[in-house]
Amino acid sequence: MEHEKLTHYLEVLCQSGCETVNATIVAIEKNQPISFIEELNTEEQSIVLKELKAIMSVYDH
C-alpha cells in the first residue's frame, strides 16, 4: 500500500468539498462503485473511509 497514493486521493476528495466527501463516505459504506477510487483495493478504500470520517468529524462539533 502506497501512503502517497492514499494521501493523493484524500487531498483530491477534500478539495472537492464537503458534499463530495460525504457522498463518498456513504458510497463506500454501501459498497457502491466509485469511479474515482475504483483502482484502490478493499483495504485501501477502508483506510480512505476511516480518514474521511476523521476529517469530517471536525465539522460535526
Image (spheres, rainbow, N blue to C red):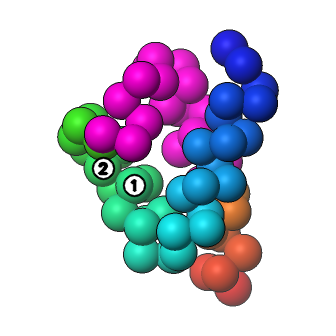
Q: Is residue 31 above or below residue 19?
A: above
| Percent coordinates x, y for residue 4 in the rendering | 77, 30
| Percent coordinates x, y for residue 51 in the rendering | 66, 48
Q: Is residue 21 above or below residue 4?
A: below
| Percent coordinates x, y for residue 5 in the rendering | 67, 30
Name the quadrant containing residue 9.
top right
In this view, the residue farthest toward the bottom is 61
Q: Is residue 19 left or right of residue 55?
A: left
Crowding near the residue tagged with mark 1, few <14, some 14–19, many ≥20 C-alpha atoms within 10 Å: many
Our reading of the magenta stretch's main secondary structure is helix
- Asked whether the viewer can see residue 61, the reply is yes
Q: Tell me whether circle 2 and circle 1 mark residues in contact (CB < 8 Å).
A: yes
Name which residue lies at 52% across and 68% down: 16
Name which residue lies at 42% across and 36% down: 37
Crowding near the residue tagged with mark 2, few <14, some 14–19, many ≥20 C-alpha atoms within 10 Å: some
Query: What residue range appears in magenta?
Result: 35-52
Q: Is residue 39 magenta?
A: yes
Q: Is residue 34 left or right of residue 10?
A: left
Q: Nearer the viewer, residue 11 or 46?
A: 11
Q: Which residue is mark 2?
A: 27
For the N terminus, the image quarter is: top right
Name which residue lies at 67% across and 42% down: 8
Say what amino acid the circle numbered 2 marks.
Ala
| Percent coordinates x, y for residue 57 in the rendering | 65, 69
The secondary structure type at the circle numbered 2 is helix
Q: Is residue 21 magenta?
A: no
Say what amino acid the circle numbered 1 marks.
Thr
Q: Which residue is mark 1?
A: 24
